[in-house]
Amino acid sequence: MSRWIVLLALLLVVVASAITVVALKHQGRQHFIALETLNKQKDAYQVEWSRLQLELAWLGETGRIERQARENLNMKSPQRIGVLVTRDD
């Protein structure tokens, strides 16, 4: 009789262990799917960041800024540039 109890207990332990393995495997797959989704999102953000960096470099280009100032704001370069130095006494 005790032999049957031991076998039944071992069977329950094996079944519980198998169910735990399946549950952990499923959880691991779910975490992997979430990781892949986040990696794709990170890649999209990196592409957007690169695009914004290029746009910023284009907007800050000196020749473009001078051209915009001349054409849109009717600004001109000064004819003479002078420096005035004063002495504090």
Image (cartoon, rainbow, N blue to C red):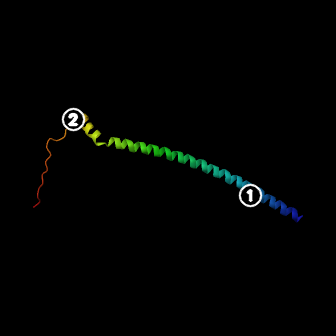
Q: Secondary structure at mark 1?
A: helix
For mark 2, what is the residue? Answer: 74
Left or right: where 30 falls relative to 22: left
Q: Could you tell which of marks 1 and 2 lies nearer the N-terminus?
A: 1
For mark 1, what is the residue? Answer: 17
Q: Position of residue 89 (x, y in %)?
A: 9, 61
Q: In the rendered structure, which amino acid carries the disc numbered 2? A: Asn
Left or right: where 35 falls relative to 83: right
| Residue plotted at (57% across, 49% down) | 35
Q: Quadrant of residue 76?
A: top left
Q: Residue furthest right?
A: 1
| Residue plotted at (75% across, 57% down) | 16
Q: Secondary structure at mark 2?
A: loop
Q: Position of residue 13 (x, y in %)?
A: 77, 60
Relative to the observer, which residue lies in front, 66 or 29? Answer: 66
Left or right: where 20 falls relative to 39: right
Cα–Cα gap, marks 1 and 2:
80 Å
Mark 1: give few (<14), some (14-19) or many (20+) Cα within 10 Å: few
